[in-house]
Image: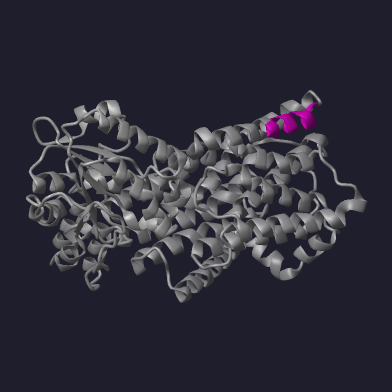
Amino acid sequence: MTSKQTYRADIDGLRALAILPVVWFHSGLPGAPGGFVGVDVFFVISGYLITRIVRDDLAAGTFSFGHFYRRRFRRIAPALAVVLIATLAVGYLMLVPDDLVRLCRSAVAAVVMIPNIYFSYVGGGDYFAIAKRAQPPLLHIWSLGIEEQFYLFFPFFLMIATRFRVARPAIVLAAVASFALCVVGAKHAPVAAFYLLPSRAWELALGAMLAVDAVAIPARWRAATSAIGIAMIAASIALLEGQGISPLWAVSIPAFGAMLLIGSGPNAPVNRVLAFAPFVWIGRISYSLYLWHWPIFAFLQRWWIDDQLPAVWSLAGIGLSIMLAWITYRRVEQPARRSTVRFGLVAAPVAVGAAIVLAGSLSAITSAGLPERFTPRARAMIAEGDDHAPLGLTCLNMPLSDVERSCVVGKGTPTMLIWGDSHSASDSAGIAAGLGQTAVVIGNGGCPPAIDPRSGMTAGCLKRNRAILAWLGRRPAITTIVFAALWRTYEKRDRGAFWRGMQPTIDALGGKRVIVLAGVPYPGVDVPTDSAMREQWGRPPLRFDCPPARVPITGVTLVDLSTPFCAYPEPWRLFVDRNHPSMTANRAIIGPAFAKIRSEKEP
């Protein structure tokens, strides 16, 4: 028999404060750029509640690992199984083969409780980047992996610490060590630091410290601390931006805010507001709402074939998420959690569901994503994603000492340098063929060839480019320089400043001939995938927006590819992804454009 836990309605209200910004953030609607921090609030809540359960049962002498894990299973597994099956079913109907394979791999990882490890090492890396571009329908399950792994290890930790009467200092030390790992990891291994339990455990430990009274807020301070706590969470939602994972320590603001709210107790003014019925209702369905919302938005984005949903679609997605969450809470969560329902009656259907997920996933993975679901023409469009230029996947961020061995197009001594970001490699075949010269390719991800800080580039980028200039100075045979980059990305920050920062690079090249490749359109969507989906669903074919190139620098020859790209009759053949030209584009557009200027003199 476990000890009786005192229910706190304000904590359900705090769950609502956590889930609503997450859903809003993922919907793409404006107003909550830091809504992702709701996950960090959930971690603190989980740490508090789980520690309180284990602590009280240990104190009463009634703790049982079997009972603890059965309760966690009832809480997590049934709703998760329903969402996984539904997500796989919709994915079968909507996803191209490669994306279906990725979905199935993440579903298998979810079943075996390692989705965070999967997304850290296999599934794509930077959370914000893949959430925006790839929209994996189960990406959000990474946080559930953190909690499941915490449930697996923490009871043993707390039981041993309690037996030796060091629970409080042990939890505090664990929190400090985990936070230090988070800060260091965010700089040196940001992807792992974001996804993995050791660098996230401090958030759960904040709640655990409250549960074991390692931290206690005096009653006379609680009105103030509850106000400060909600202000910290609100400020984080309004001010933080989900554009990268390096400043991971920044989520300490909402995490400590949640700690203050929980520690202020149910009678603090803000906590009494959180205990209002509407907040409690949202809090109670928050787990199912979290499970449902992201697959819904991911599939809506696939159906709309764009990263940005119209506002009405986003609002419809929120409404659908809440409706399905309420149904799942009433029909799945609540029945499964009733103590009057035998555990076997809960475990058996979940086991069947897990078997369906595993069998279906493994079948799709071993059959390469079941490509026969698509028409032959749609499959041909999908295949364009493999039409890379020969160096398109290899010559990126290569050490300068290796480029002449590994990144050369043509035969003989290079007389041309193709220099830029990742586009320098993807465009290299057409450039070299068009000019009839042997070229060495130097591509730096997200780093155009600027040496002046006015360009807005990072210190590391500027340093790399200055090293390239020095390398070039030792190679007099190279007399032609071609700049190729996704210029619009860097122009968005400050167009005038960026190009003023590019001019010193041109000036530093002396008498060499400098050519700028520009005008490549930015589709903004994965061209092979989205073209195939348009074909499969009878949608109008993809069309590019091709504004004329504007390159406000002197001493260069401009090759503007905007017109031929928009005139090409089969645009789906021109890109391998969202913005990198294919080998078809190299042969049909880039090469001929450079052939036209082969005999032109220097500017």
The answer to whether residue 138 is seen in the rendering is no
Image coordinates of residue 82 in percent, x first then y, are 48, 57
Query: Camera-side residue: 204 or 568?
Result: 568
The type of colouring in the image is one colour
- Which residue reaches farthest bottom? 312
Residue 213: say if magenta.
Answer: no
In percent of width and height, residue 142 lies at: 50, 46
Q: Residue furthest top?
A: 164
Quadrant hosting residue 25: bottom right
Q: Is residue 111 above or below residue 488?
A: above
Q: Residue at x 81, y 37 (%)?
A: 214
The one nearer the camera, 94 or 259, is 259
In which quarter of the view is residue 492 placed? bottom left
Horizontal arrangement in the rendering, residue 65 relative to residue 149 (left or right): right
Q: Nearer the viewer, residue 26 or 583?
A: 583
Whether residue 170 appears in magenta in the rendering, the answer is yes
Residue extending furthest toward the right: 220
* Residue at (81% x, 26% y) in the render: 165
Please name the predominant secondary structure of the magenta segment in the image: helix
Residue 480 spot, x, y in % from top left: 18, 42
Report the side of 488 relative to 417 (left or right): right
Q: Position of residue 335 (x, y in %)?
A: 61, 59
Q: Is residue 458 above or below residue 575?
A: above
x 55%, y 47%: residue: 144
- Can residue 115 be spotted in the picture? yes
For the image shown, how many numbered marks are present on the structure? Answer: 0
Give the image quarter of residue 176. Answer: top right
Q: Is residue 405 left or right of residue 10?
A: left
Stretch in magenta? 166-176
**Quarter the N terminus occupies:** top right
